[in-house]
Image (cartoon, helix red, strand yellow):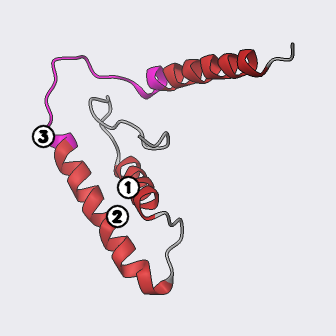
Amino acid sequence: MCRNIKPLFNFDPPATDDEIHACALQYVRKVTGMRDPTMGNKAAYDAAVAAVEAATRSVVSRLVTRSPPRTREEEAERAAERGRKREQQLKARYAPG
């Protein structure tokens, strides 16, 4: 999965429209390989973003869980910890000597 696409399910407060749009946009960017579509591709690109956004909103609103809701702060701390571990692994791998 692309690192920039964030989980949106089971958050308190729920995912915002901006978060859903950002994930849809990132997905379309990834599968098309385009950050900024040409004028000839803009309509198809925007339609794809809208379709992915609608599908995302639908699935997130229909899922159920018994787990307590997550908070964005907890998820940010977990991501930061994963980043620190990844950095330590890279330093160890490429350390001189």
Which dot marks residue 21? 1
* Residue kind at label 2, given as amino acid type: Val
Q: Residues within 10 Å of mark 2 (few under 14, many from 20)?
A: many
Q: Is residue 18 left or right of residue 90?
A: left
The quarter of the picture where the C terminus appears is top right
**Up-down: is 8 above or below 17?**
above
Q: Nearer the viewer, residue 55 or 71?
A: 55
Give the mark, 2 or 3, whose residue is nearer the N terminus. 2
Q: Earlier in the sequence, mark 1 or mark 2?
A: 1
Pointers 1 and 2 in contact (C-beta within 8 Å): yes
Marks 2 and 3 in Cβ contact (< 8 Å) = no
Q: Which residue is mark 2?
A: 49
**Looking at numbered disc 3 in the image, what kind of residue is underneath it?**
Arg
Q: Secondary structure at mark 2?
A: helix
76 up-or-down from 15: above or below:
above
Q: Which residue is rendered at x = 64% and y = 19% of the image?
A: 84
Residue 15 in the image: above or below residue 83: below
**Foreground tag (1 vs 2):** 2
Label 1 to label 3: alpha-carbon separation = 18 Å
Query: Compared to 28, does 42 lie above or below?
Result: below
Q: Residues within 10 Å of mark 3 (few under 14, many from 20)?
A: few
Mark 1–mark 2 distance (CA, rounded to whole Å): 8 Å
Taking 17 as reference, is 78 left or right? right
Q: Residue at x 22, y 17 (%)?
A: 67
Where is residue 16 drawn, in percent x and y?
Answer: 35, 45
Q: Which residues are magenta?
A: 60-75
Q: Earlier in the sequence, mark 1 or mark 3?
A: 1
Position in image of residue 44 (x %, y %) = 34, 77
Judging by the rendered image, the residue that carries numbered circle 3 is: 62
- Left or right: residue 74 compared with residue 69: right
